[in-house]
Structures are given as C-alpha cells and as structure tokens.
Image: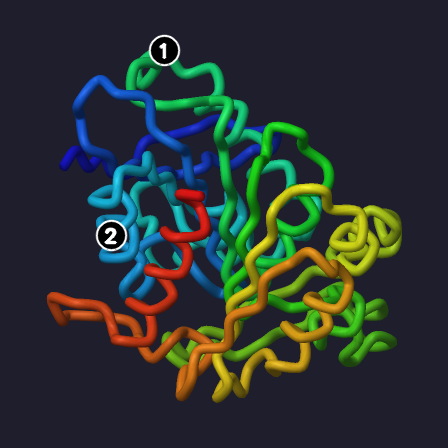
Amino acid sequence: MKILKNSIIQGKHSKPIVTDVFYKEDQQPKKVVVFCHGYKGFKDWGAWNLLAETFAKAGFFFIKFNFSHNGGTAVNPIDFPDLEAFGNNNYTKELDDLESVIDWIATNTTYKNEVDVNDISIIGHSRGGGIVLLKANEDARVKKVISLASVCDFGSRGTITDDLENWKRTGVKYVLNGRTKQNMPHFYQFYLDFKENETRLNIQKAVANLKIPQLIIHGDKDTSVSLDEGKKIHTWNGESQLEIIKNADHVFNVSHPWYKENMSKELEEVAALCVSFLKK
C-alpha cells in the first residue's frame, strides 16, 4: 500500500490544505474517495488512518485532508496550533477547500494511472457530512455521497445561534475543547458568512435535489448529533439509504488518540457499509 502524508494543496484561501493519499500502487484506475473531517476535527483524528487503509485495501484511491482553516498547520497538522485560522473558518471556506481537493485529484498528473477521475465519491463526518451533502448537489463530478453522523441543518447549530448579541458586540465567542482544553475562537465573520450564503448552505434543499446515490450512516447512541438528524436527511431524499449502527456514539466508538491496531467493531461496520455502497 502506498501512503503519502501531508502533501500541500494550495486552495482559494490563504492557508494550505494538508492532504494524505492511500492506495495500492498497481497502475490501475481506481474509484476516488475524498473524506472530510468534522468540527474540531482533523484528518489524523482517532482511527481515520485505519479507515483510510481499509478503503485502500478494498481497491479505492482514498484522500483525506485538513480543511485549510481547521486550526492545524502544515508543520503540525494534528490538533489546533493556529487558533486564529480556526476563528476565521466558515462553511463556505470548507466548501471551497473540498472543491480544491476535487480539482487537484481531477487534474493531478502524478496519479493519472491510479485514479478514475470519472468516479469520485465524497464522505463527510458530522459537520463534514453537511459539507459533502452541499457539495454533492453543486458538483457534477461527484458520483456518490456518504454522510456519517451528519448534521442536517447549519443554521440551528450553537455555533450560529448562541450568544448572538454579545458575539456581534465583541466580534468573537469561544468554545472549550474538552480534550485539548483550548478556548477556541469563532469570529463574527462566521455568522456574517452564513447569513450571506444561507440559501446555498441549506442542507435540506441540497439533499432534496440530489440525483446521485446517497448513503446516510448514524449511530443510535449519538449524543452529539441526534439520530433524528440522520432520519430527517433520509426523509428529504426518498432514494437515499439509511443505515443505523447499534450502540455507536458520534465517532462510532473510537477516540483520539487511538493506539489499537484495529478500528472499533462499529467503525468496521461503517467501513463495510461504505465499501459495499461505493463498489456498486
């Protein structure tokens, strides 16, 4: 298996998009899978590397990356050394970053014998699930879409609704990262960008308009994003497939750091469902 870590893609914004690829180097065109992490996430979180290896072993060309403003850097892509960047992130930047990654693999000559650029699928976890659902509706290059423990609505999240008056007055509000103990900033531009692009960022409308295969996976013990959100997404597209993972939490029973050699059985079930769906 070929694993190339921390390559740099220059996107539309000022920060690099730090990117990993996993694949079998056999000069055979492979279906491309692009994975998007969630809020306060990063490409190397928990068992995401093991997930990437699973897809590569199954014959896919797997790409995962850090959103340019997720708070990581090219030197340190794990955790959040750049809180200024984190505070300047927003949904449209993430959509732009995903587009830049798709552009990159679609035109990359290094991997031209290893990828089938006419078969690109996107997967997103949590907030990244909302991003991939929007992008799947926008970009005809996307042939299938999978959301894992996805949010169904950006406008109702606390990142938008909490403490709005004080946020406007001070220009910043903070959220505590329970694992790293950092007070992570959200600058008021996040709200302004959402309001300016509210129609584009409507997940319900995007899902209802999808004409490609859609898989929704959610754990029944998810306390971060309710299973009801996954069920709502399913109702918006009658052709979608909903899979509920029993006894699975928001991250399918893995954590960070993850030192075990194997994924949790719940994440293994997720991987198997995804591989089966994408191979059809």
Answer few, some or many: residues within 10 Å of disc 2's Cα (few below 14, many 20 plus, some between 14 and 19): many
The residue at the point 64 percent across, 68 percent down is 151
Q: Which residue is mark 1?
A: 109
The residue at the point 33 percent across, 60 percent down is 272
| Residue sticking out furthest to the top | 109
The image shows residue 221, relative to residue 179, as above or below, that is: below
The residue at the point 74 percent across, 54 percent down is 207
Query: The residue tagged with tag 1: helix, strand or loop?
Result: loop
> How many marks do you count on the picture?
2
| Residue 147, position as x, y percentages in the image | 55, 59
Viewer-closest of 160 and 264: 264
The kind of residue tagged 2 is Thr
Query: The residue tagged with tag 2: helix, strand or loop?
Result: helix
Task: Residue 182: name its quadrant.
Answer: bottom left
The image shows residue 39, relative to residue 101, as above or below, that is: below
The tag on residue 37 is: none
Quarter of the image with the C terminus in it: top left
The image shows residue 11, relative to residue 230, as above or below, that is: above
Q: Which residue is mark 2?
A: 54
